[in-house]
Structures are given as C-alpha cells and as structure tokens.
Amino acid sequence: MSTVPTSPTTPDMVEHPAHYTRSHPGMECIQLTGDCTFCMGNCCKYLWRYRSKGHPVEDLRKAQWYLRESIARNEPVRWTLTQTRILIRLRGEAERDGNEPEYRVWRDLAIGDVHEALLALADLIEHMYEYDTEKETQR
C-alpha cells in the first residue's frame, strides 16, 4: 500500500481541509455535523464553508436545498451539548461580523426552528447575492 506524504506546509485536504478549518478557527465542521441526520448535516456543512470555496451563493443554495429536504423528511433536530456550544459560537461569530442573516440562521437552527432558519437562509442568500453582484460591478 502506497501513501503519499504531505509536506508540513501543504494543507491536509483529506483530514483537515482548509475550507472546513479556516472558516471557524478552533472548531471543525465534523464536530457539528457528525451526530446530525444526513440532510441537516449537509445543510450545516454547506453553511459552514460557504465563504471558503469561492462560490458562496451556490453553497448557500445547497444548504437551503438540504434544509428543505430535512423539513420534508421531518427529520428530528436534536443537538448534543457539544453541537449546541458550536452553534452558539457560530451565532456569535456572525453577530460580531455584523452578518445579521447568518446570525439568524445559526440562532434558529440552534433552537430547532427549521422553518425560521429556512427564511433566514433565504435572506442570507439574497444578502450574499447582492454582495457578489456589488463586487462584480466594482471590477
């Protein structure tokens, strides 16, 4: 069995990909998603990384799709203590960044209000679409 060594300066794209570790220092996405239902885990994954891969609106739309699917499947929302602490930190980061729609998404997910989270996610998508459009016109 052959293994490919990674350089100490090369990010580990398998065990610790930058788009999951850089977004929220001190936390890893798997700590939040590991105990989630499939659809909720994917929703959180795309929310987690939406600013890190260069396609924020696309990632947010994927999160929205998975959240809708989670609602349609009537998946239960039960957070562990660790997950709750992470959601509180994510909410706090969004609040400090002045990102009110993202704050609302994390807040609503934390309290299990998936319908309000879906509305907040739509607002976040609109917010990021406007931001991307503004960036494009400045080029």
Image (cartoon, rainbow, N blue to C red):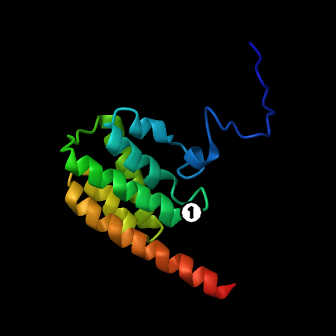
When the figure is inspected, residue 87 is found, relative to residue 2, above or below; the finding is below
Q: Which of 35 and 42 is in front in this view?
A: 42
Task: Name the residue at the bottom extreme.
Answer: 137
Write the residue at 59% across / 56% down. 52
Q: Where is residue 71 in the image (x, y as percent from the top left)?
A: 22, 50
When the figure is inspected, residue 5 is found, relative to residue 11, above or below; the finding is above
Which amino acid lies under the numbered mark 1 shown in the image of this protein?
Answer: His
Q: Where is residue 9 in the image (x, y as percent from the top left)?
A: 80, 40
Write the residue at 49% across / 66% down. 57
Q: Mark 1 points at which residue?
A: 55
Write the residue at 40% across / 33% down. 34
Position of the C terminus by quadrant: bottom right
Q: Is residue 78 left or right of residue 25?
A: left
Quarter of the figure with residue 91: bottom left
Q: Where is residue 89 in the image (x, y as percent from the top left)?
A: 41, 51
Quarter of the figure with residue 68: bottom left
* Mark 1: secondary structure: loop
Write the residue at 35% across / 72% down. 123
- Density class for disc 1 (Cα within 10 Å; few <14, some 14-19, many ≥20) is few
Task: Name the residue at the top extreme.
Answer: 1
